[in-house]
Image (spheres, grey):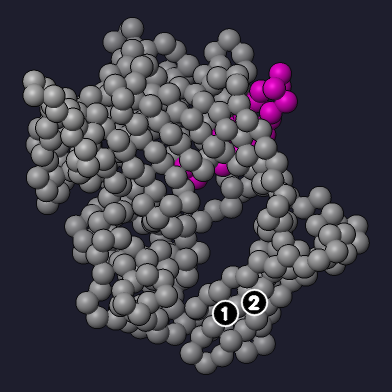
Amino acid sequence: MADEVPASRWAMRYTTAYRFMLVDRSTGLETAELRTLRAEGSTIARNQDTQIKESASIACAGGFDAGTGLVRCYFCPRWADGYEADVPVGTWLPNVPSREVDGLSESSTVSCSGRLQELSDDAFESPLTIAAGESPVEVAADIVRSCGLGCEADESDYRLSAPWTFGLATDSEDGGSKLDAVNALLSIAGFASATTDGMGAVQLRRYVEPSAKSPSWSFAEGPTARFERSMTDERDTSKVANVVVAVYSTQEAEYVGVAVDDDPLSPWSTVARGRRIVASYSYSDLPEGVDGDEAQRYADAKAAQLLETEQAPVRRVRFSHVYAPVSPGDVVRMDFPSGSVSGSFAVRTQDMELSGGGLRTTCEARSFEGRR
């Protein structure tokens, strides 16, 4: 596993290989090596801002039929001193959208979706109702497991203060899939949306602001640098808001919290920009026992907190590097003084190329620079 490889190993030279395995969906066991799948021409895409989070396009020499099975890919670096690692980089649902034939040979492109696709494709046959006092995270984990997926969840002491109902696919504003329900429940409890790890297990993790995370990896300029010098550095202020509205709606009442930046000394304020730029957020539940004046104060505090976040200009850095044990959502440190790029950045997307050595990855990472 990637987290079992000493960090110092990744700064050393190694040879690269890949292995593709067929995984039985019902047991989770690997049943055969898929020797017709090829690394050359294959890619993996990870995107924190999409529901399914990951996809892959795998080259295949000949036809392909996995039945109801899954495809798992291992990145297999080998060091000169004999040290070896087998890093699972994805477990996916395969299908074959295209096939090339010339009468003598046949090749295919196996298009794969992350396992969250299984939750997205499923829906409830009747409205889902959860009683007050239940844990939304525990319910979300139960939904995931009921669809046959493994699940790992952070502990949460959050409990619903009122019953919560998720509608059918035909009448739900959220879309109605089981993945929509899982993510809605996670949001109520202050968790990030569901993700998957390399083995295909669903991860339900508490949301942590990128600014509160410690970097899990460092890219440093120098003789052992593992990134390419050519990169894009961009600072985006187009979506910096100066008004935030946070609405909490319960069966008994609605509480509207508002925060406004009208400070003439703030570059983003209604005064400085000469107009209101509003960001709105809606929530369907309050913490258990919070109501009345306390609920209004809670909504106002949430709006003020969100205003701080909304007033952080986004700095985007796009760069390429050989494999590093990081995933979307992780924070990395970049020290590239000759390119005037330094700081901590949260990984948003990764486009990975299996061709060639080192699992070349093109990454977009962001930092939120805070109010100025």
Q: Position of residue 1 (x, y in %)?
A: 32, 31
Q: Position of residue 21 (x, y in %)?
A: 17, 33
Residue at 62% over, 84% down = 255
Crowdedness of circle 1 by 10 Å Cα count: few (<14), some, many (20+)?
many
Can residue 287 be seen here? no
Task: Report which quarter residue 225 is drawn in.
Answer: top right
Task: Report which quarter residue 16 is drawn in.
Answer: top left
Q: Position of residue 36 (x, y in %)?
A: 14, 26
Residue designated by label 1: 248
Q: Residue furthest bottom?
A: 252
Residue at 59% over, 70% down = 281
Residue designated by label 2: 299
Task: Report which quarter residue 343 is drawn in.
Answer: top right
**The magenta stretch spans which residues?**
328-346
Give whichever of 269, 330 is nearer the camera. Answer: 269
On screen, residue 66 versus residue 351, left or right, reads left
Name the main secondary structure of what is drawn in magenta. Answer: strand
Give whichever of 278, 33 is nearer the camera. Answer: 278
Q: CA distance from mark 2 to mark 1?
A: 7 Å
Q: Identify residue type, mark 1.
A: Tyr
Q: Identify residue type, mark 2.
A: Ala
Please tell me which of labels 2 and 1 falls first in the chain. 1
Residue 298's place in the image compared with 48, above or below, is below
